[in-house]
Image: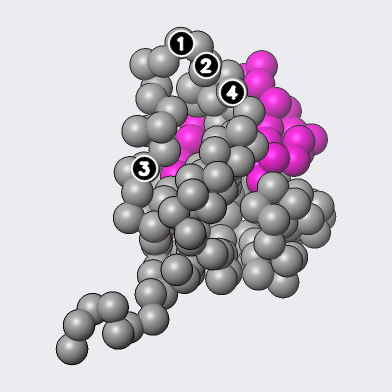
Amino acid sequence: MDRRDYTKIRVGLGYDVHPFEEGRELFLGGIKIPFDKGLKGHSDGDVLIHAIADALLGASALPDIGYFFPVDDKSIEGIPSTIILEKVRDLLKEKGVNIINIDCTIIAEEPKIMPFRDKIIKNLSSILRIPEDCLSVKATTNEKLGFIGKKEGIAVFAVALVSY
């Protein structure tokens, strides 16, 4: 059977991790989270957006965010990750890719994420131009194990389902 006979539905997995850094603001899903540290990174360190971006790019058979936003490019140092996600959204649109849903898990001992969950989903929905019920954002701890358990950083897994 010819490949064109299949409905094109693809899945992508994204992962990102950043250590905490004093003197920075914390952003998750483009939302400023009140906390005494931010995340170290070439951009604003928004691990949630980075994982989502890579999941969407992977599902669309495009290179990862480092290809489009290289860490050695000084002109984009400190860039808001929302700009990265807007670029990914536009790349998908150019390729005719539709986002079906995105599921994310934030892994952090602190801060508590759930008080900000609805605001994060609303913001991501607006940036990606998809309904809020197509986004799932969950949080868990690492049960005090590893660098996350020692409160040294945050990691995120994201899965994206797309069609075209």
Taking depth in this image into account, of 142 and 11 the one nearest to the observer is: 11
Asked whether the beta carbons under mark 4 and mark 2 sit within 8 Å of each other, the answer is: yes
Q: What's the amino acid at mark 4?
A: Ile
The image position of residue 122, as x and y in percent, is 78, 55
Circle 4 residue: 79
Q: Where is residue 27 in the image (x, y as percent from the top left)?
A: 68, 36
Q: Mark 3 points at which residue?
A: 64
Residue wearing tag 1: 74
Let me know if residue 73 is in the magenta part.
no
Q: Which of marks 3 and 4 is nearer the N terminus?
A: 3
Q: Give how far apart the Cα atoms at labels 3 and 1 are.
A: 18 Å
| CA distance separating discs 3 and 4 | 17 Å
Note whether residue 99 is visible: yes
| Residue at the spot 28% in from the left edge and 78% down from the top edge | 4
Examine the residues drawn in magenta and state their main secondary structure: strand
Q: Looking at the image, is 115 positioned above or below residue 102?
A: above
Q: Which of marks 4 and 1 is nearer the N terminus?
A: 1
Please report contact status of discs 1 and 2: CB closer than 8 Å, yes or no. Answer: yes
Q: In which quarter of the image is the C terminus?
A: bottom left
Furthest-bottom residue in view?
1
Residue type beneath disc 1: Lys
Q: What residue type is labelled 3?
A: Asp
- In the rendered structure, the answer to whether residue 92 lies left or right of residue 130 reads left
Magenta stretch holds residue 15: yes
**Could you say which quadrant of the image residue 71 lies in?**
top left
Q: Where is residue 39 in the image (x, y as percent from the top left)?
A: 57, 30
Query: What segment is highlighted magenta in the picture?
Result: 13-38
Callout 2–callout 3 Cβ contact below 8 Å: no
Q: Is mark 1 on a helix, strand or loop?
A: helix
